[in-house]
Structure formats: C-alpha cells, structure tokens
Image: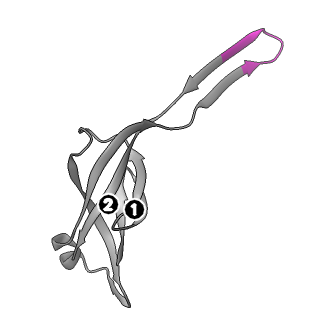
Amino acid sequence: MYAIVRAGGRQEKVAVGDVLIVDKVDGAPGDSLELTPLLLVDGSTVTTDADTLAKATVRAEIVKPTKGPKITILKYKNKTGYRKRQGHRQHTTQIKVTAIDA
C-alpha cells in the first residue's frame, strides 16, 4: 500500500517506513504529524474519492531537522565593478512514515 501526500507544497509518494525530506515542520524529534493524502493505492484498488480520503490519514514521525544544499547566489554587472555574492541553505525536516490508515 502506498499513498500520494501533500507535504511542504509538493506531492510525495510514500509507503510505510519511507524516510523523506520536507520543508521545515515545527516540532521536536519523536513528535508525530499527519499528512494529507491525495491518492491511496492498495494493490489494484486506487482511491481518489474526496469523501473517502477525508477519513484516511497518513501518520509520520519527525526524525531530525536538517538543512538543504548550499545555494550560491551571484549578482554581477558589467563595467561597473558591481559584484555581490550570497549563500543560502533552506531549513528542512526529515520525517519517517509510520502508518497509512484507509
């Protein structure tokens, strides 16, 4: 059984035991959270009905807060001596899917 869930503005395919990285979620490691399922697949049965999905839950546990890769931002204007260099690392959270209840 797997599900497509909305996590951090993106859609992710998850199954029980999967570890994924999403945008920053408030909470301490060990806390649980619920994700919104958009589609459930159980063998050959595919569920997309909104009423059925409203009753379904995908539970996950926060593993640890992390940071994304370093992004280098460089601005440059020709013939003026203008250069600006900046870096950024997005805060993310690593979560582990513990249960999918249909």
Q: What residue type is labelled 2?
A: Val
Q: Could you tell me residue 61's position as x and y percent?
A: 27, 52
Q: Give the range drawn in magenta.
A: 76-84
- Which residue is found at the position 27% from the left and 41% from the top? 29
Q: Residues within 10 Å of mark 2 (few under 14, many from 20)?
A: many
Quadrant of the image occupied by residue 25: top left
Looking at this view, name the residue that lies furthest to the bottom: 44
Q: Which mark is residue 26?
A: none
List x then y, in percent, for residue 38.
32, 69
User: Which residue carries the number 2 mark?
Assistant: 97
- When the figure is inspected, residue 60 is found, relative to residue 55, above or below; the finding is above
Q: Please provide percent x and percent y for residue 1.
A: 34, 78
Q: Which residue carries the number 1 mark?
A: 18
Contact (CB < 8 A) between labels 1 and 2? Answer: yes
In-front residue for pair 86/94:
94
Q: In which quarter of the image is the C terminus?
A: bottom left
Residue for point 23% across, 45% down = 30
Magenta-colored stretch includes residue 48: no
> Where is residue 18, by image quadrant?
bottom left
Q: Position of residue 95 (x, y in %)?
A: 34, 51
Looking at the rendered structure, the secondary structure element under dot 1 is loop
Inspect the image, locate mark 1, and give the three-letter code of the amino acid beneath it: Asp
- Residue lying furthest top: 81
Label 1 and label 2: CA atoms lie apart by: 5 Å
User: How crowded is the residue under tag 1: few (<14 C-alpha within 10 Å), some, or many (20+)?
Assistant: few
22, 79: nearer the viewer: 22
Q: Is residue 15 above or below residue 67?
A: below
Q: Write the residue at 84% across / 12% down.
A: 79
Marked residue nearer the N-terminal end (1 or 2): 1
Say what secondary structure mark 2 lies in. Answer: strand
Which residue is rendered at x = 35% and y = 41% of the image?
64
Q: Is residue 82 magenta?
A: yes
